[in-house]
Amino acid sequence: MVTTNEVKKVADLAKLEFTEPELAELTGEMNHILGYIDQLKEVDVSNVEPLENLNEGVGQSALRRDVMRPSLTVEQALSNAPKSADGYFLVPKVLAQEAKSYIETDIMGDEDEELF
């Protein structure tokens, strides 16, 4: 049985914050899930062979065959690219720009935004 304090401890480790009613609800849900696991422990599986491969017993694999086929050349792939160089796509530094805007926002004094 999971206690509210244990749920609170896990939430703290995950850096999550919950109100007391939410903690009570989560505690109930966790105990409900553990109840299902206890039910599964009661099932007799002594005559069931362990499953070693999901495709065992399936006549044909559900996956497509790995067949080599023609693909685009580098020139064809880059033909519609807005910018390219030396056979590579050139893209803007999106993450660097986002981080810069977060820092600028923080410096400007927007207290609602936090940096991690």
Image (cartoon, grey):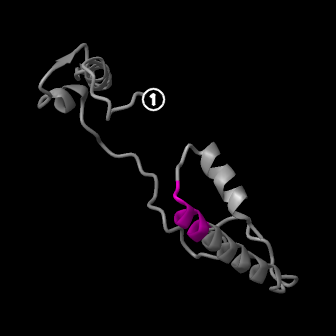
Expressed as whole percent of the image width and height from the top left, the position of residue 17 reads: 52, 50
Vertical comparison of 50 with 70: above or below:
below
Q: Nearer the viewer, residue 67 or 20?
A: 20
**Left or right: residue 50 compared with residue 7:** right
**Residue span colored magenta:** 18-26
Residue 45 quadrant: bottom right
Dot 1 alpha-carbon crowd within 10 angstroms: few under 14, some 14 to 19, many 20 or more: few
Q: Is residue 19 magenta?
A: yes
Find disc 1 in the rendering and name its residue. Answer: 116
Please identify the residue farthest to the top as the structure is shown.
86
**Left or right: residue 37 compared with residue 8:** right
Look at 29% across and 42% down and name the residue there: 70
Please identify the residue farthest to the front as the structure is shown.
20
| Identity, as a three-letter code, of the amino acid under mark 1 | Phe
**Left or right: residue 26 compared with residue 116:** right
Look at 74% across and 66% down and name the residue there: 2
Q: What is the count of numbered marks?
A: 1
Expressed as whole percent of the image width and height from the top left, the position of residue 63 reads: 48, 63
Residue 43 quadrant: bottom right
Expressed as whole percent of the image width and height from the top left, the position of residue 114 reads: 38, 31
Task: Tell me the SS state at disc 1.
Answer: loop
